[in-house]
Amino acid sequence: MSRIPTPVSIADAPVKAQPLLAAVNAQLGVVPNMFRLISNSPQTLEAYLAVSGALGKGALPAATRERIALAVAEVNGCNYCLSAHAYLGKTLAKLDEAEIAANRSGASHDPKADAAVRFAATIARQRGQVNDADLSAVKHAGYSDAQILEIIMHIAINTFTNYVNEVLGTEIDFPIVEARKAA
């Protein structure tokens, strides 16, 4: 049970959040608990959806975005996000179990994605304190300056949802995956 109320339905959410949740429902066919919980602040939900929507139009492939989400969730010990992104990684990004396990460990079996995931995990673990070699490795793998900024923003938005779910105890509504340990 979450630490603050999770609206049971779109109609139970604050009026200003209802169209936002309806849009989530139209896109996903369901409104996961995290979105309904965040809807307690329509402005926060609006900001989250705007950033997520903008990043969805970015230069990083969907599979790489899911890989980063898994790495960051593992670093932050967020079971809700691990559960959600393991499910989304399998169903939408078509990641297999071995790839998901590698992502959770801050790596990837795909050589280019590996550089992005390692960079993201390093940033999350080191709270942004990376060295020139870390940045050089991701650039050497072929990531542009714009893509590097997107990686950083993905870490930020995933850290936000990790914190929301951990602080507020969002009830997991995906097949449960538990963090190995928080970093």
Image (spheres, grey):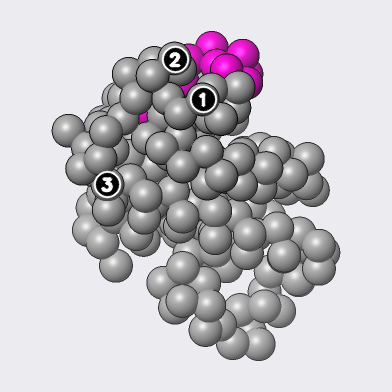
Expressed as whole percent of the image width and height from the top left, the position of residue 72 reads 44, 56
For the question of whether residue 18 can be seen, the reply is yes
Is 54 situated above or below 135?
A: above
Percent of width and height locating residue 172: 28, 31
Mark 3 or mark 1, which is nearer the start of the sequence?
1
- Residue 22 placement, left or right of 148: left
Amino acid beneath label 3: Leu
Q: Residue furthest front?
A: 15
165 with respect to 21 (left or right): left
- Looking at the picture, tell me which residue is in the foreground, 173 or 70: 173
Residue that extends furthest to the bottom in the rendered view of this protein: 132
Percent position of residue 127, x then y: 46, 76
- Dot 2 or dot 3: first in sequence order is 2
By secondary structure, the bulk of the magenta-drawn segment is best described as: helix
Number of numbered discs visible in the structure rendering:
3
Question: Image quadrant for the N terminus?
Answer: top left
Q: Mark 3 = which residue? A: 168
Q: Which residue is mark 1?
A: 15
Amino acid bearing label 2? Ala
Q: Secondary structure at mark 3?
A: helix
Residue situated in front as seen by the camera: 11 or 57:
11
**Whole-percent x and y of residue 34?**
40, 34
- CA separation in Å, label 2 and label 3: 21 Å
Query: Which residue does the image show at 79% across and 48% down from the upper left?
Result: 59
User: What residue did someone put label 2 on?
Assistant: 11
Q: How far apart in space, not on screen, are marks 1 and 3 (Cα)?
A: 21 Å
Q: Which residues are magenta?
A: 21-34
Q: Measuring 44% from the left and 78% from the top, which residue is drawn there?
A: 126
Instruction: Specify the amino acid type for callout 1.
Output: Val
